Amino acid sequence: MSSPDLSHGPSYSPPRKLAIGAAVIMAAVAAVADLGIYFWIAAGSALGGVTRFWLSGLAARLWGETFPWGTLLINATGSFVIGFFATLTGPDGRMFVGSTTRQFVMVGICGGYTTFSSFSLQSLNLLNDGEWLSAGGYIGGSAVLCLFAVWVGQTLAVGLNGLKLL
């Protein structure tokens, strides 16, 4: 007759170790699954950034580089797109898209495309150069134009959704 194996000591508990192992595996699987959204955000950011670079260069060739017309245009069109898309695909929107698609467009594309960091730097540079009137026009124009653009985008999407504005 053999004696029971007590070599693992009294604290050995196979079910507990299996549960911990399963929890670790499930956490790893969830982390890998979450990487998918990061891929889409990165892809959208790349598209937005490349588009911003192209449009900024086009504006510089068309209107010169003395005033940041490209950044103003990009911020206004980006504000329009995010206002339009957020409203069109929101809870009361006409078009249903999943959260990954909304994040791809609104966080990825619009985040990579709009340039408020550039706006801030260019505003500061105009101020540092003593271009007070240009800086004021740029800052005020950006705020007014972007708020107007997001309102127009939202209004258009509300019209497409068949809803009334509040």
Image: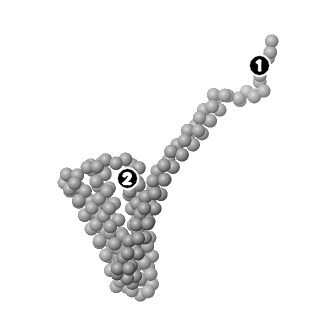
Q: Secondary structure at mark 1?
A: loop
Q: Earlier in the sequence, mark 2 or mark 1?
A: 1
Q: Secondary structure at mark 2?
A: helix
Question: Image quarter for residue 144?
Answer: bottom left
Q: Position of residue 91 (x, y in %)?
A: 30, 48
The reply to whether residue 62 is visible in this rendering is yes
Residue with the mark numbered 1: 4
Where the N terminus falls, by quadrant?
A: top right
Question: Image quarter for residue 15?
Answer: top right
Where the C terminus falls, by quadrant?
A: bottom left
**Foreground label between 2 and 1:** 2
Q: Position of residue 139 (x, y in %)?
A: 35, 76
Residue with the mark numbered 2: 102
Q: Count every numbered label the image shows and give the total.
A: 2
**Viewer-nearest residue: 74 or 124:** 74
Task: Give neighbour class at mark 1: few <14, some 14-19, many 20+ (Cα, 10 Å).
Answer: few
Residue at screen point 38% across, 56% down: 105
11 shown above or below 48: above
Q: Amino acid at mark 1?
A: Pro
Numbered circle sitting on residue 43: none
Q: Amino acid at mark 2?
A: Arg
Q: Position of residue 9 (x, y in %)?
A: 75, 28
Residue at screen point 60% across, 39% down: 24
Q: Is residue 153 left or right of residue 71?
A: left
Cα separation, mark 2 vs mark 1, equals 60 Å
The reply to whether residue 136 is visible in this rendering is no
82 shown above or below 62: above
Residue at screen point 71% across, 29% down: 11
Q: Position of residue 115 (x, y in %)?
A: 41, 69
Spot the residue most to the top.
1
